[in-house]
Amino acid sequence: MSFTEIPLYDKGAWQKQLSGMSTYDVYHTSLYHELIPRNFGDSFLLSYSEGNYKLCFPVIIRDIAGSPFRDATSAYGYGGLLTGRVFIPGEIYSNFKDALSDYFFRKKIISAFSRLHPLIPESSVFPENMGKVEAVNTTVYLDLKLCDKQQLTRYSCSLRRQIKKIDALGLKVRIAEKKEYPAFARIYSQTMERLNAGKKYFFPDDYFEKIMNAPDFQTCLLLAEYKGEIAGGGLFTCCNEFMQYHLGAVPGKFLHLSPLKVIIDAARQFGTRSGLKYLHLGGGYGGREDGLFEFKSRFSDERSVFKVWKWIVNRPEYDALVEKRFGDQIPSTNYFPLYRYEW
């Protein structure tokens, strides 16, 4: 058996390990982890092999302020375990747990958290007594393996009518060239400002440049135009069989045209032509079944469950940090790890 820590700078080794998995998505790649700010933590791909069985697990290891200990988390999006085969015997998982436990002990990691991929079932299969997996919310996806007519029958009747109406108004969607990303970046920032979005939803300009030119996956930028102006844009990532709706933006003056409806419809057609299997739209804000979730639900009746994995590796030190942070006034929240919770 072999347990290897692959650092972010060793992109060749990272990609080689991913290539041996049954599948993976953009969130598992080294480039996606490279987009994470340096001060957030150090990214690694943990690789375990035993005989013909292999597992990979991307993690971000962070320092804990005022403590000699650290914790592990995942990149924003969907991570989780990857396997070289869909079926892994329980004994292999047990041995993986022992190897990961030893690794965490050596790294002084007291807790671990990971968002899990809703469309990769094995991403949420963890060894027994190795933390717990919790369902967070429901997400929406489109089955691109269906023919075009079948895909459209999954649309709500009102959505089909609205798309026809938007088309009749003369709003057109096209695939943008890579060099056009600054135009999207600009309207994206304006959109986030209009929505009073949190800091995590804002990105530096080089974020868009890097993701548009990623070598490990394809990025599709769709722009909607109306009377010579950009009326909206959508950024989609394509990796293996997965197409992910990554970012969307609409200038305030074009909100009445609902350009994101025709942009997602165009993305569906692009993904189908490209031989992808799924277009994942995600869920609502903060895991809620809100207006955003309702909007996405109009495109499909297909649902997946978004789950997270939580593991308290070192209970005494974890509890000590929680007590140091809150004393005897521990908040009632499901946030994990609790010592990072902000009132």
Image (cartoon, helix red, strand yellow):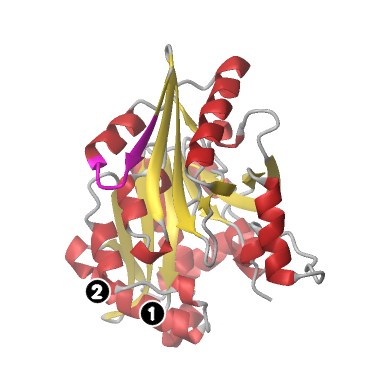
Q: From the viewer's perspective, tell me whether residue 113 is left or right of residue 247.
A: right
At a point 31% along the width and 79% down the height, the residue shown is: 186
Q: Observer-nearest residue: 339 or 190?
A: 339
* Label 1 packing within 10 angstroms: few (<14), some (14-19), many (20+): some
Give how far apart the Cα atoms at labels 1 and 2 are: 11 Å
Dot 2: few (<14), some (14–19), or many (≥20) neighbours within 10 Å?
A: some
Q: Residue furthest left?
A: 179
Q: Mark 2 is on which residue type?
A: Pro
Residue at position x 35%, y 44% in the image: 29
Secondary structure at numbered mark 2? helix
Q: Which residue is mark 2?
A: 182
Question: Quick check: can you spot residue 251?
Answer: yes
Tell me the kind of residue under disc 1: Ser
Q: Is residue 243 above or below residue 64?
A: above
Give x and y (percent) for residue 63.
48, 59
Image coords of residue 10 (percent x, y): 25, 41
Which residue occupies the foreground of this view, 85 or 225?
85
Specify which label sits upstream in the sequence, 1 or 2.
2
Seen from the viewer's position, the closer of residues 196 and 168 is: 196
Mark 1 secondary-structure assignment:
helix
Mark 1 — residue? 189
Residue 231 location (% of width, % of height): 37, 77
Q: Which residues are magenta?
A: 4-11
Dividing the picture into quarters, in which one does residue 159 lie? Answer: bottom right
In the picture, measured across the screen, residue 255 lies left or right of residue 270, that is right
Task: Give above or below for 232 relative to 29.
Answer: below
Rendered view: 77 above or below 37: above
